[in-house]
Every structure is written in C-alpha cells, then in structure tokens.
Image (tube, rainbow, N blue to C red):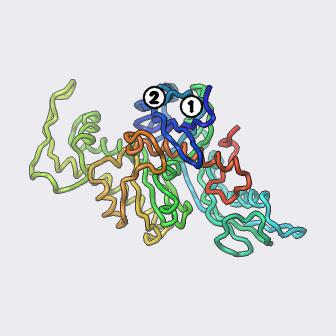
C-alpha cells in the first residue's frame, strides 16, 4: 500500500523520463528515497508524438523508481511543457457588497476568477493562476486580505495556459499505467521550486531549465512570478547543428557534444583535432575542436539572447539581484555559465537543489531539478490544504481539468 507521506514527481522529457520519490517530513523537510530513469521515446520538443511508446517509457521509469525507493507508487505530480504554453499578467477587481465591509475567502476566490476573464484560444485551458499582489482600497503590499475592511479588492495574477489536448496526451501516458494524477505543473515553475529559495525570489531571479527539446524559463521579481515562457529549442538542436555542420551522424554528434563539446571559444590548441573512431555505418573522421565549440557556442548564445529579449520586455535587469540560475541537462555543457554571464550581464549560477536531503548524486544533478521541484510543489499545496485559512498563497490553482479529484 502506498504511504501518505510519499510524494512522487515525474517529468516526461524529450531525452529522458525521470521519476523522483520523496518522503515528506515534519516542518516541511523532504528526503529523496530514490529515482527512476528511462530513455525517452515518443516525445518531441516536450510533447507526446507516439502515445504507446511514451507510455512504455513512463512505465519503465516508474518501475525503476519503485525498485530504487522501495516504495509503491499510486499517484504522481507531473510536469508539462511545450511551445504551446503561454502566459500573461492580469488584474482582477471586485467591489465589496454594501451590506458589509469585511473581505472574506469568497471575495478572494471571486477576484481570482475576474483576473482570468480574458479571452484565450478556445482550445486552451488554464494551468495556473499565481497570485502576485493584493490591493485593498488602493493599499499596496497586502499579503492576506481576508478579514480586512474595505470597499474594493484588487489582485494581480500571473496566468499560464496551454492547449488542452496536447496537455492531456502527457497525462494519458501516466494514467495508462494505472497511476493517478495529483498535480499538473509547468516545468519552469517546478524547477524554480527546487533551485530557488525565498530570499532569491525576493531579490529577483531567472530560472532557465534547458532540456533536450525545449528550454523553459521563469522570472521572479520582489518574490512573485512576473514572467514565464517556453522556447522550442534545447540540447537536441545543438546536436543537430553539430551533425549538419560537421557532417556526422546525429548519434555521433550527441556523443561528441557530451564528451568533448564546450561553449568556450579560443581555449584549445590552434588546429587541434578530435578523432572519431570507426563505427558501424560510420568510417570515422577527424573534426576540429574549435569548429565543434563554435557550433555549440552559437546555438547556446542565440537561445540566451532570445530569452533575454523576452525578459527585458517585462522586467528591468536591475530588478534581478539574484541573477540567473541554470538547470536542466544542457546546463552541464562546459563553459555555459560564461556564455550566460556575457549575454545577461548578471550573476549566473549552476543551480543545485536546496532544502532537500538524499543522495548527492541526485541533488547535484540538474537533470532531476524539475522532478524534485514537483514533489516540493505538491508538499507546499498539501500544507495549504491542512491550513485552509492560508489565503496569501504563492499558488492558487484554477481550472477543472487540473484539479485533484
């Protein structure tokens, strides 16, 4: 029988399916019991393209996680991504009825509904409505309006939505394995739960999660989410660039990127060559190290520049005092921190998961950040459910498709 203190997060990514099993302890502590990994197939750019094959990969990752954690998995929190996911900031406002002046929980719920009374594509569905600020009769900085006296309640939210059917395909991979869904969380929000503490959120920070098929990012300013997005560019695109630029098979390009690649330019010996040995269907070849690094550098830099352009439209750089946190598999590329610093002109850190105990091989591996963040997210929601009076919530979930049943 599954234990109530066990929380599981699963990321069905482009390059891997990762499941992390954690044990929730007292006072918000979390201990990682085990992880499960499986190569990902049937997934492209963070989305399902072959349901049957992807379902098998999910099964393999969950089975591996159960074996390594010695825990039965009955339900999971799942991360979702894809270029179809969109976000915007919106303000809701409601008058407080004339027969009373005290704001109650129903008013807080109503103002959240008002904030998302904005037309989105009919095929899309709301994923998250994340509170930014409350205002009572124009008073700023209100953390919890319940019980306050006022005639008008306003609230700013960061709202995230995506194409319903494309999201459901990811969920179906889980349910086909007889597993229930606890929470659905966008990748960037989950990763931020793992790699940022509250102080960093207060200072202002960017989290960039660079996966195999997509790059998810989220921006905090003054402790709240101000912007988020997904770029349909990831590590697979770097490998594809290497394959085309050096005229080698894609599988060799991926291996070359991981084993020899770097984003640093001009650091090797001029004319230094890398020897690729003969292999089945490949006669071998020598490639110039500087050419390899130039290809990697160009794609990584372009990716960062696209993200910077999006962020600067919403938040000034001086508001990001904690800088940039890099996570995801691509953050393991040599020299990537230097490229990010030159693009963003901010402090850049290779993120590691905080406030969690367990094997260092897991905590120090950025490929697990999203799945660890999922269980921390679920733990935070569980704490809120145990204290229903806690309305000054970081996350308020809206939308019937994604509510726990």
The number of numbered discs placed on residues in the rendered structure image is: 2
Q: Is residue 271 above or below residue 72?
A: below
What residue does disc 2 label? 68
Element on which disc 2 rests: helix
Residue 341: which quarter of the image? bottom left
* Residue extending furthest toward the bottom: 138
Q: Which mark is residue 174?
A: 1
Q: Is residue 114 above or below residue 125?
A: below
Spot occupied by residue 30 in the image (x, y as percentages of width and height): 53, 44
Within 10 Å of the Cα at label 1, are there few (<14), some (14-19), or many (20+) other Cα atoms?
Answer: many
Between discs 2 and 1, the one toward the N terminus: 2
Element on which disc 1 rests: helix
Residue 348: which quarter of the image? bottom left
* Residue extending furthest toward the right: 99
Give the CA distance from mark 2 to mark 1. Answer: 19 Å
| Residue in the image at 61% along x and 42% along y | 183
Residue 88: which quarter of the image? bottom right
Q: Which mark is residue 386?
A: none
| Residue in the image at 82% along x and 67% along y | 102
Spot occupied by residue 223 in the image (x, y as percentages of width and height): 55, 63
Q: Is residue 185 left or right of residue 360?
A: right
| Residue in the image at 49% along x and 43% along y | 372
**Residue nearer the viewer, 27 or 82:** 27
Q: Is residue 108 left or right of residue 311?
A: right
Within 10 Å of the Cα at label 2, are there few (<14), some (14-19), or many (20+) other Cα atoms?
Answer: some
| Residue in the image at 72% along x and 56% along y | 113
Q: Is residue 142 left or right of residue 349?
A: right
Indicate the quadrant containing the C terminus: top left, top right, bottom left or bottom right.
Answer: top right
Q: Is residue 41 left or right of residue 277?
A: right
**Residue nearer the viewer, 321 or 157:** 321
* Residue 372 seen in this snapshot: yes
């Amino acid at each position: 029988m599954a234990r109530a203190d066990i929380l599981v997060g699963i990321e069905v990514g482009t390059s891997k399916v990762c499941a992390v099993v954690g044990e929730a302890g007292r006072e918000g502590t979390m201990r990682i019991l085990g992880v499960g990994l499986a190569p990902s197939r049937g997934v492209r750019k963070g989305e399902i393209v072959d349901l049957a094959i992807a379902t098998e990969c999910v099964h393999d990752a969950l089975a591996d996680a159960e074996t390594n954690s010695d825990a039965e998995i009955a339900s999971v929190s799942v991360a979702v991504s894809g270029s179809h996911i969109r976000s915007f900031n919106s303000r809701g406002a409601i008058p407080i009825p004339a027969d009373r002046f005290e704001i109650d929980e129903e008013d807080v719920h109503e103002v959240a509904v008002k904030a998302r009374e904005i037309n989105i594509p009919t095929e899309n569905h709301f994923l998250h409505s994340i509170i930014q600020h409350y205002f009572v009769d124009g008073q700023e900085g209100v953390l919890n309006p319940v019980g306050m006296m006022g005639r008008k309640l306003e609230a700013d939210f960061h709202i995230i939505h995506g194409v319903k059917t494309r999201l459901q395909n990811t969920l179906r991979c889980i349910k086909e394995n007889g597993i229930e869904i606890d929470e659905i969380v966008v990748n960037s929000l989950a990763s931020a739960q793992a790699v940022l503490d509250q102080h960093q959120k207060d200072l202002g920070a960017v989290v960039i999660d660079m996966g195999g098929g997509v790059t998810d990012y989220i921006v905090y300013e003054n402790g709240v989410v101000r912007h988020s997005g997904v770029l349909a560019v990831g590590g697979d695109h770097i490998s594809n660039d290497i394959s085309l630029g050096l005229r080698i098979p894609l599988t060799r390009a991926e291996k070359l990127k991981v084993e020899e690649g770097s984003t640093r330019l001009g650091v090797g010996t001029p004319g230094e060559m890398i020897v690729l040995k003969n292999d089945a269907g490949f006669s071998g070849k020598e490639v110039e190290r500087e050419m390899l690094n130039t290809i990697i550098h160009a794609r990584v830099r372009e990716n960062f520049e696209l993200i910077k352009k999006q962020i600067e439209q919403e938040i000034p750089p001086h508001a990001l005092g904690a800088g940039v946190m890099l996570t995801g598999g691509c953050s393991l590329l040599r020299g990537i921190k230097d490229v990010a610093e030159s693009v963003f002109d901010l402090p850049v850190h290779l993120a590691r998961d905080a406030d969690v105990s367990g094997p260092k091989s897991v905590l120090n591996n950025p490929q697990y950040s999203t799945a660890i963040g999922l269980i921390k997210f679920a733990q935070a929601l569980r704490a809120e459910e145990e204290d229903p009076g806690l309305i000054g919530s970081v996350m308020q979930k809206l939308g019937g498709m994604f509510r726990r049943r």
